[in-house]
Image (cartoon, grey):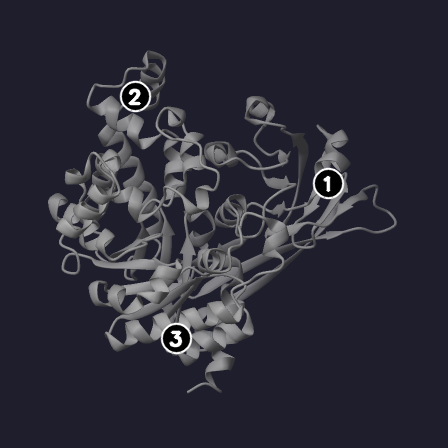
Amino acid sequence: MYMAENSKYIINIQRKKAILDERSEAKLVFEGGITGAPGVVMGKLRFISDVAKIKKLRRGDILLTKEIQPGWGQILKLPVGIITSHGGPTSHIGVLSRDMDIPCIVGADDVVERIKKLDDQFVTIDASEKKIYKGKLSLNIVNQKIDIRDLKPTRTKIGLMFAHPRPEKYFAPLSSYASYGGNNLLRTEFALLLEIGIHPRALVDHFHGILQDKELTSKINKLIKGYDNAKEFYIDIMAKSIGECTSIFPEHETVIRTLDTKTNEYRDLLGGESYEKEEINPMMGWRGALRFISPANRQVSIWELEVVKRLMKMGHNHLSLTIPVCRDPIELLGGEELRQKMKKAGRKDWQEWKGIYEIMEEVGIRPHIDIKVGIEVETPSNVIRSDEFAAVLDFSTFGPNDLTQFCLACDRENAEINKIYSSDNPAILEAIRKVARSFKKAGKTINIVGQNFSQILLETLLQEGIDSIGTSWEGYFDLVEKIAELEQHIK
């Protein structure tokens, strides 16, 4: 937990550590898994086998389940701690728990079978140490004050990445740090999952009066009560959620990522099953730029851009836009080449396809002029065709989790594989070098976002002149120390 004092320079870091001694009645019942988000917390254990049983969950409980389903977004406002059998540090729940500052243990294999008998009993989880105790433990609380004026300066800008303002709001004093790099990545899909909870196309159809499902229409009517229509509901909530994040550092740039929601996440939203097919591997499927430019998703994409326009009108003047999983430069440029490609692919709607830049112009946002546009470097095509991408973009941001996943053919949701492959693999390092040199040659900026960067990865990034590194809140100050030290040896 991070708490800012009444000073623009001081951040107070409060760390909790569980204390188990001979006087304690608590008992260690499980040890293992992976830290999704660090921290120690106590509460009643609540075993939820599937979403149908979710009504058992109460605010302040510790959620135990085999796997957090993507559609559980709004439910995650209730627990103070989370334990799962499946998942890794870069899985959906691993990322979200860190952003929401919820202590979380993931990938704990047989944890459900081992401790579900403790359902409705008090437990303590020490996610930092990957330990679970039956009963309440004494907590040792240590406060550490960080004075921004004492942080070592770095040539490389170091910023934050986040999706939820809960922990990051305590970091506002970083505005006074000369090396602060801004909000390097703001993941908009979590605003959709946490705050809206309705499939966007269902909202679009509701807005146009063509939603056939009467029960779904009734449910949406209740949720959008107080708004003129479904469109205003969507744009207002998304803009407020994103704006709450950008307002923390108003004078620094915020890189907004368009929705990177995958089919399994969309299916679990209200109305989602009517619009989403089941995919065998959603990570490699209907996501990113291709979904954004598809005619079926056109209105959703326009609404996304309307959110950006709303933010600009609200006075958020330092915004950039980044596109996830962009497989081909023509997905950005559009034009006849894109339409002919879709015709050749047998798309009946081939004439309706437009590139991202064409859709932006249609909405009244001029790419490169009104807002900078970049991509997340995640696919082998981004690497192989890096010169082409650099020529039509303002910047690039390395997404090491997906880049590793796609280059090494390893599912990042699979904890077993996650333990074997990482972004310090020679293939990933070489990919980073190639893209960095292409963008630097074109006079464009390069960034990276992630956490737990290895020594060799950081050295590679600095050698290639990375402009900015964004990391999660819990690892920020450790990263500053590492970069400051490495920069002394890398010119």
Q: Residues within 10 Å of mark 2 (few under 14, many from 20)?
A: few
Residue 430 visible here: yes
Q: Secondary structure at mark 1?
A: loop
Farthest right residue? 22
- Kind of residue indicated by mark 1: Asp
Q: Please count the marks in the image.
A: 3
Q: Which residue is disc 1 drawn over? A: 110
- Kind of residue indicated by mark 3: Thr
Real-space Cα distance between discs 2 and 1?
A: 43 Å
Q: Residues within 10 Å of mark 1 (few under 14, many from 20)?
A: some
> Residue at the spot x=34%, y=44% of the render?
259
Q: Which residue is disc 2 drawn over? A: 225
Real-space Cα distance between discs 3 and 2?
A: 47 Å
Q: Residues within 10 Å of mark 3 (few under 14, many from 20)?
A: many
Q: Secondary structure at mark 2?
A: loop
Which percent across, then down, holds residue 383? 36, 65
Real-space Cα distance between discs 1 and 3?
A: 43 Å
Which percent across, then down, holds residue 375? 31, 58
Comparing labels 2 and 1, the label whose residue is closer to the camera: 1
Which percent across, then down, holds residue 252? 30, 62
Q: In the rendered structure, are the residues bearing label 2 and label 1 in contact, judged by CB atoms less than 8 Å apart?
A: no
- Kind of residue indicated by mark 2: Lys
Q: Secondary structure at mark 3?
A: loop
Q: Earlier along the polypeptide chain: callout 1 or callout 3?
A: 1
Q: In screen coordinates, is 152 left or right of 394? A: right
